[in-house]
Image (cartoon, grey):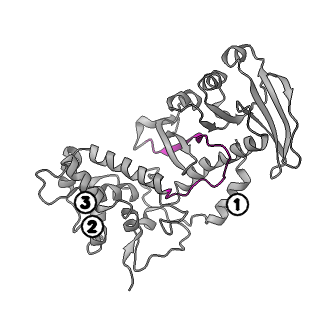
Amino acid sequence: MVQVASLFNQLLQHFPRAEFAALVKKHGAEHAAKGFTCWTQFVSMLFCQLGRADSLREICNGLACCLGRLVHLGILKAPCRSTLSYANEHRPAALFEELFWTASARFRQQQALGGRKHKFRFNNKFLSLDSTTISLCLTLFPWAKFRRAKGGVKAHVLLDHDDYLPAYVLLTEAKRSDVKLADSFALNPGSIVAMDRGYTDYALFGRWTMAGIFFVTRLKDNAAYAVLEEFPVPANRGILADQIIRLTGTRAQSDCPCLLRRVVVWDADNQREIVLLTNLLTFGATTIAAIYKERWQIELFFENSTWCTPLDVMEFRGSIALNRPLVGSLDGFVRPPIARRPRCAVSRVHLHRPASRASVSTQSNARQWSA
């Protein structure tokens, strides 16, 4: 028997209807409702994101084009614009907020996006901190002016390496500095944070060290320091130097008076030296190098977030093709994150052939040491 399902339907299967109905009852979201259910509202707004719709008319007309197939999504007919607008304005947003946290907790518990690929011996919470700029059209979003003819917002992401899901996401203007927002993330003592040179701030390093928070980053070329102790380096591990240092800059001494560690690693792929800075004084040099190399997973997270396009999500098929290079099975490694919004109003859907998993993996491995 051929299973009739779309990739959109596969995505909706990660939100159990019984669980959703319990949340609707808890919040009383369908009180005095006359036929228009919260599930139909949820499917419509999810279609809005995946279909890059800019108006209620596009949502309703887009769903109306799929009459006869909407039953697979759990709805009978496309909503009217006025009905959807009224529901978005009057129904409690707390319903969908709790739905998000419930789904997030279930994904983390099941490790639906995969567990940690690199096994470390330490039990510390391992996080990566980085940001990515999301380009926006200034005609549609004049408030998001970034440069003279460019608009955008910046997503500051703290990625949890236990399941490669964001532990915290902060959206700001694209012109905001990364390092100035590093204090906005709540970190527990004992956490290890891997980041690039864009977050170099000796005062931040000093506060984290006093709070028991560890970091691994790149050392700037013009950093002034004094070597206090040299450690022997392991053979055939790519470690060139392992030193205990103290910052000697005028402000650095007062901002970060604690001892730090300088580890020089040889990058065989790019034939260059990489100088790491950390306050992990008891870990092995190879472990410190592996921690910074694992930081590349946050770059892959940003890269994977652009793989899914509306045509791939909304395409109805008689059978589910598990070997599709773009989305494939939702239970596999490739996942269907929400696609980017169009850069301008005239650009609706762009047909393109996404990179395969093999080519992306090859390109990513070549750049995984880049700052």
Q: Residues within 10 Å of mark 2 (few under 14, many from 20)?
A: some
The tag on residue 74 is 2
- Residue 195 falls in image quadrant: top right
Q: Is residue 193 above or below residue 369?
A: above
Classified by dominant secondary structure, the portion drawn in magenta counts as: loop
Q: Residue at x 28, y 56 (%)?
A: 20
Q: Amino acid at mark 3?
A: Thr
Q: Are marks 2 and 1 in contact (CB under 8 Å)?
A: no
Measured Cα–Cα span from mark 3 to mark 1? 41 Å
Q: Residue at x 64, y 22 (%)?
A: 206
Measured Cα–Cα span from mark 2 to mark 3? 8 Å
Q: Element under label 3?
A: helix
For mark 3, what is the residue? 40
Q: Amino acid at mark 1?
A: Thr
For mark 1, what is the residue? 362
Range of residues picked out in magenta: 111-138
